[in-house]
Image (tube, grey):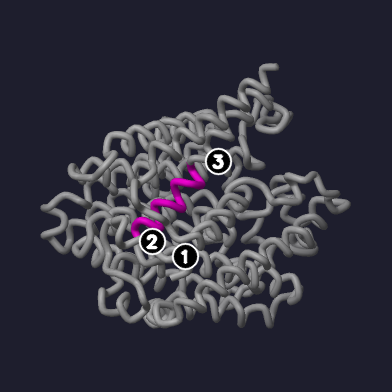
């Protein structure tokens, strides 16, 4: 009975959040449901896991083989996204022209399939990774990019966070598990691990914080108070879930990236070229110092963690001892396959499938060339964020906050891994044209200039 009541309350609460955040007279593109569904899946569990499909015989086989059902669903969403993008050919061409670093990175990932020991598996994973870019393009090439970003992130956050609370409170068999190694309960909500719950709470908590700040700054916006209430509640849920999951990485990202979001929109920062750089560098430098420079571990211990970062240092030592090719790596998403997977498990923690450091993870798969291309992405993404900040502060503050969060998150988690909400957020942050689409380009594509939609200027279904 308690589960039934909790489910009804949760559904009603989700519906209430959607109604509170609705903009009167605005009809978002139906195409935005494609990236929404994509994020709902990647932010929770694979469809095969929800349907309790039979897993592979072992963890290693399950990781390497994947599920045909999941592959089919990803394929359908990617094809649907490409069909929509075909209707926005001019905007897509503009996007590709302004994102050469991203194209170079994707091309190198495709090239690295050639030296993977498991090229077919690497090819399948690369094909899925293209879906992340397709989904980001669907959002950014929308006639109203900022509204599209808000809609997609809000929809996913309004669903996943309340459902995580429901699972933890009313369906403990689905939302939590006992860890015999640590002797504690792990809470993971709609995801499969506590750090994943922390990650989605951080990503969508930042999105709601951004929406709340935007609504607060637009004093003439209709239903302004309702928007602020809905997103303030969502931010509160995100914080509580992160604390419940005991994910200090996600909590640090939320606090530091949230501070960046607030500070970079100040006029003195916008007027000074080095202001944003100082704020972003400071936010990234603090955890960098605490984790890798402060050898006494004072700051780490103050957060309730030990000097091994909950076993991460042993994982880093184990994966680096594999002596992969330092220049080109093992190939796209190929390190955790075959004998290396079992070898790392024997030296560190059984069952892990990531290096718990985004930069090390990328080095293992793509080598120093991959790290160089990632650095190019980060630098160009930061420049795009600063340019957006001066052009449209609402756009720029989200970009710089997500960029900061992705870099901090990747210090102790695989933040640059495809098919995750943090990677989606990183792509949104570095993309070359969000609110920067020129009215002339929008006009040529059949769209309209940026701004709040009115009943007379609604978004068309595909364009």
Which of pointers 2 and 3 lies earlier in the amino acid sequence? 3
Q: Nearer the viewer, mark 2 or mark 3?
A: 3
- The disc placed on residue 429 is 2
User: Looking at the image, which residue sits at the far top?
Assistant: 1
Q: Please state which of the two labelled residues, at mark 1 or mark 2, is closer to the viewer.
A: 1
Q: CA distance from mark 2 to mark 3?
A: 22 Å
- x%, y% of residue 69? 77, 59
Q: Is residue 196 above or below residue 77?
A: above
Left or right of residue 109: residue 432: left
Indicate the secondary structure of the residue bearing disc 3.
helix
Alpha carbons under labels 1 and 2: distance apart: 25 Å
Q: Residues within 10 Å of mark 3 (few under 14, many from 20)?
A: many
**Mark 1 and mark 3: span between their CA atoms?**
25 Å
The image quadrant where one finds the C terminus is bottom left
- Report the disc number at residue 130: none
Please state which of residues 396 and 324 is positioned toward the viewer in this rendering.
396
**Which residue is labeled 3 in the image?**
160
Foreground pick, 131 / 411 = 131
Earlier in the chain: of badge 1 and badge 3, it is: 3
Whether pointer 1 and pointer 2 mark residues with C-beta atoms closer than 8 Å, the reply is no
What span is colored magenta in the figure? 146-157
> Can residue 417 be seen from the camera position used here?
yes
In the rendered image, the vertical position of residue 7 relative to residue 114, given as above or below: above
Q: Main secondary structure of the magenta part?
A: helix
**Front-most of 343 and 442?**
442
Q: Residue 156 colored magenta? A: yes
Left or right: where 84 falls relative to 176: left
């Amino acid at each position: 009975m308690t589960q039934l009541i909790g489910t009804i309350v949760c559904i009603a609460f989700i519906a209430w959040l959607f109604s509170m955040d609705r903009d009167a007279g605005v009809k978002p593109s139906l195409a935005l449901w494609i990236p929404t569904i994509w994020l709902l899946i990647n932010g929770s569990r694979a469809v095969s896991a929800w349907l309790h499909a039979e897993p592979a015989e072992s963890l290693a086989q399950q990781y390497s083989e994947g599920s045909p059902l999941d592959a089919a669903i990803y394929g359908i969403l990617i094809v649907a996204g490409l069909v929509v993008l075909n209707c926005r050919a001019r905007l897509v061409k503009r996007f590709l022209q302004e994102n050469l670093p991203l194209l170079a990175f994707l091309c190198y990932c495709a090239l690295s399939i050639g030296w993977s020991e498991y090229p077919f598996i690497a090819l399948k994973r690369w094909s899925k990774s293209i879906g992340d870019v397709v989904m980001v393009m669907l959002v950014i090439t929308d006639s109203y990019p900022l509204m599209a970003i808000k809609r997609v992130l809000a929809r996913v956050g309004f669903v996943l966070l309340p459902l995580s609370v429901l699972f933890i409170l009313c369906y403990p068999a689905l939302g939590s598990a006992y860890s015999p190694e640590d002797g504690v309960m792990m809470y993971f909500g709609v995801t499969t691990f506590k750090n994943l719950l922390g990650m989605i709470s951080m990503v969508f908590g930042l999105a709601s914080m951004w929406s709340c700040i935007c609504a607060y700054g637009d004093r003439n916006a209709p239903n302004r108070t309702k928007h602020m209430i809905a997103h303030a509640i969502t931010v509160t849920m995100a914080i509580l879930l992160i604390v419940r999951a005991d994910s200090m990485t996600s909590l640090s990202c939320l606090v530091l990236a949230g501070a960046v979001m607030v500070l970079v929109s100040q006029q003195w920062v916008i007027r000074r070229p080095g202001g944003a750089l100082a704020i972003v560098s400071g936010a990234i430098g603090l955890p960098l110092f605490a984790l890798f420079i402060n050898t006494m571990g004072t700051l780490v211990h103050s957060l309730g963690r030990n000097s091994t970062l909950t076993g991460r240092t042993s994982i880093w030592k184990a994966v680096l001892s594999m002596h992969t090719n330092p220049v080109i790596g093992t190939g796209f998403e190929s390190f955790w396959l075959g004998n290396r997977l079992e070898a790392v498990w024997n030296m560190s923690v059984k069952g892990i499938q990531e290096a718990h450091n985004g930069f090390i993870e990328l080095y293992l798969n793509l080598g120093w060339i991959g790290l160089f291309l990632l650095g190019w992405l980060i630098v160009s993404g930061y420049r795009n964020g600063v340019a957006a900040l001066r052009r449209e502060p609402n756009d720029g503050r989200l970009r710089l906050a997500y960029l900061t969060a992705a870099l901090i998150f990747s210090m102790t988690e695989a933040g640059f891994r495809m098919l995750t909400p943090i990677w989606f957020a990183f792509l949104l942050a570095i993309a070359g044209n969000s609110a920067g689409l020129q009215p002339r380009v929008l006009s040529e594509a059949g769209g309209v200039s940026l701004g709040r939609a009115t009943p007379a200027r609604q978004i068309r279904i595909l364009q």
